[in-house]
Image: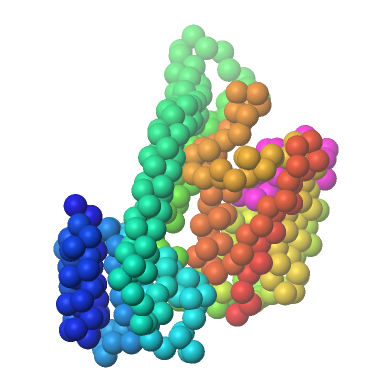
Amino acid sequence: MKSVLIIDDDQPILTMFSFTLENAGYRALIAQSGAEGVELAQEEEPDVILCDVNMPGMNGWDVLWAIRSDPQIAHVQFILMTGNTRDITPRAGMEVGADDFLAKPFGQDELLKSVEARLHRAEISARLAQRAESELRVSLRSTLPHEFFTPLAGILGIVELLRDKNAQVDAKELDEFLADIQKSGWRLHRTLNNYFTAIDLESSPASPEHAPSIDADRVRRAMEVGVDNAMLRHDRQDDVQVSLAPCALRGLTGDFTVLVEELVDNACAYSPRGAPIAVTCTPDGELTVRDEGRGMTQAQLSTIGAFRQFDRKKYEQQGLGLGLFLVQKIAERCGATLSVDSAPEEGTMVRVSFEKS
């Protein structure tokens, strides 16, 4: 039986709505305050929450924020309701994470239709999540072993060779072996770092309003480090053109480095050596990375996610396929907007528009 939690400080409303829902075959849960509603939601994990906006103490906005901040119940369908439609609009409710909006007074049919629509939406989301989880398992099976064991095999193989008493290695060969060990070590380090960064970003709700202000010089230095890391890793110093204007932004210094590094790394990986890559940031906080590589189709763009690589069988690639996923999540954490324009065989342009501090 599907459950609906009703949160309202008006007892007659609670009685009427619970009666309507129970007669329609739902299990009705009631709470007469926002704090009580959040506690009950955490205990019962209802399928739908119906919450009034105007309540003393913890109001509907506070309840919505608390629900969306709790990973255990953040997915629950949330319907806001209010009689103050002049100051509170459906758009305002949707912008802060509500799934639907009901203006009081409304009838029983409207209530039931809204609940049914939210449950239908939840079922579709669950099916899509199961499909994505299945695809993720397949992707992980094909990428994780390769990305973890390939550099390890390289390191262990060289160490075994160097320990062989019969091996004759001159100074030049030794230097090359040590360089290969270092390269494999850094590849493994980056793989593990990106893996745990992705897990952290996925499990932590974005709170851009709490992001600190970073001065212009620190932002530019952080972005420059990201560019340098990527182009040195791919040996593309002659291809990357950089123009970063000073701009104070909201976010974490390390996030700016990771975001730029992943964008430039993707541009290097998806474009041939010698093709230009342009990295620019305007004084208004608009970062763009443009390449003239093989590009992506609209279908591929619509399925950007963690541990996903495109055409891996066709093209030799390194990495877990986390690049644009990390960029997407970091942009959310900074309160930035992300757009990707790409076409097969024409290249890709990624634009990140930050909020200035």
Task: Where is residue 329? Give x, y as percent.
Answer: 51, 57
In this rendered view, identify the residue nearer to me: 143 or 22.
Answer: 22
Asked if residue 57 can be seen in this view, the reply is yes
Residue 266 in magenta stretch: yes
Query: Which residue appears at 59% of the width and 46% of the height?
Result: 302
Q: Is residue 219 above or below residue 124?
A: below
Asked if residue 176 can be seen in this view, the reply is no
Task: Where is residue 13? Give x, y as percent.
Answer: 23, 81
In this rendered view, identify the residue nearer to me: 101 or 227.
Answer: 101
Q: Is residue 338 above or below residue 169?
A: below
Query: Which residue appears at 50% of the width and 72% of the height?
Result: 95
Residue 39 in magenta stretch: no
Number of numbered discs visible in the structure rendering: 0
Magenta segment? 262-276
In this rendered view, identify the residue nearer to me: 140 or 146.
Answer: 140
Asked which quadrant contains residue 205, the reply is: bottom left
Query: Which residue appears at 63% of the width and 40% of the height?
Result: 299
Q: Is residue 324 above or below residue 15?
A: above
Question: As drawn, is 237 to the left or to the right of 10?
Answer: right
Asked which quadrant contains residue 93, the reply is: bottom left
